[in-house]
Image: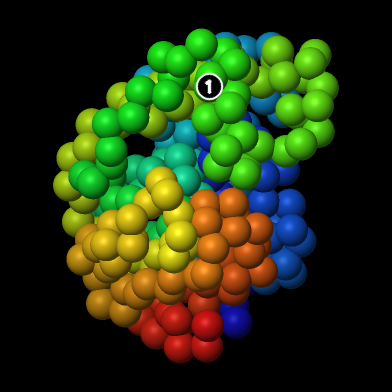
Amino acid sequence: MTESWFALYPPVGGGRGAYSRMVVELREHGHCHLPALAGRDSRFAETAAARFKDLSDDLWNQLETEFGPGRSPDGLVLFGFSMGALLATEMAARLQQRGTGARGLVVAGCPPPHLLAGRAVHTLPDEELTAALAAQGTVPSMVLDDPELLSVMVPVWRADCAAVASHPRRPVVLECPVHALGGTEDPLVREADVMAWPRLGGAGSSVRLLPGDHAAVLDRQDLMAAAVLEAADRPSEVGARW
């Protein structure tokens, strides 16, 4: 496989380390673009964006800086889980709008943008917000067990959830293949919603349902990495070796 580019977008509260296991494998095949989100990593002191447009504009600027204005590599594959899937989809749409496009989009644990539910988790009190996210199984126990770290993360979680809630929910139609992964028992994402993703993408789009809930999908970083590599290698035949 020729060298590729991968752009990875994190879930709620996630940073550059959200897909650490994936990144190890992906870096053997190409370059990984891991954007820095406000409120975490090198931008820890900044206030996290609470509007989807502001967050998307920030990440778009980082992508443009990585590749140069008006450019993108031929082998770019975008990936995201949950909130990250919405961000990756937005980046794919912007790339297409400017005429450069992407080789493929891989999404996991998320409904298509126009099928997002109207959750208002960000309006809950701190304890209820934390409990709601913990119930998904995607919040590290080390955070839940550390009051000081928890106090730092709650504003980030709240901002991320508010950003998702502010998504415009407009339909997206992409020319590149779209490949979706979802859990058969995910209470946040219906199977029918996961199955709807290929209708947003071009030829070769696919779906794979995994046994388990929301956290189980995120835990299968081996399968997510395989999906991204397939999309980079043979975009019109992704899923053939899953």
Relative side of 207 to 28, left or right:
left
Q: Is residue 198 above or below residue 12?
A: below
> Which residue is drawn at the image coordinates 27% and 31% (left, top)?
118
The number of numbered discs placed on residues in the rendered structure image is 1
Mark 1 — residue? Answer: 129
Q: Secondary structure at mark 1?
A: helix
> Crowding at label 1, few (<14), some or many (≥20) Cα neighbours within 10 Å?
some
Q: Is residue 180 visible?
A: yes
Depth check, front residue: 128 or 57: 128
| Residue 56 location (% of width, % of height) | 40, 32
Residue 23 falls in image quadrant:
bottom right
> Which residue is drawn at the image coordinates 37% and 72% (left, top)?
207
Residue type at mark 1 is Leu
Depth check, front residue: 143 or 168: 143
| Residue 129 location (% of width, % of height) | 53, 21
Depth check, front residue: 162 or 211: 211
Q: Is residue 129 above or below residue 105?
A: above
> Which residue is drawn at the image coordinates 66% and 21% (left, top)?
153
Depth check, front residue: 73 or 184: 184
> Which residue is drawn at the image coordinates 61% and 34% (left, top)?
134
Query: Going by the picture, which residue comes out furthest to the bottom?
Result: 240
| Residue 78 location (% of width, % of height) | 47, 56
Relative side of 128 to 206, left or right:
right
Q: Is residue 132 above or below residue 77?
A: above
Residue 162 falls in image quadrant:
top left
Q: Is residue 169 above or below residue 110?
A: above
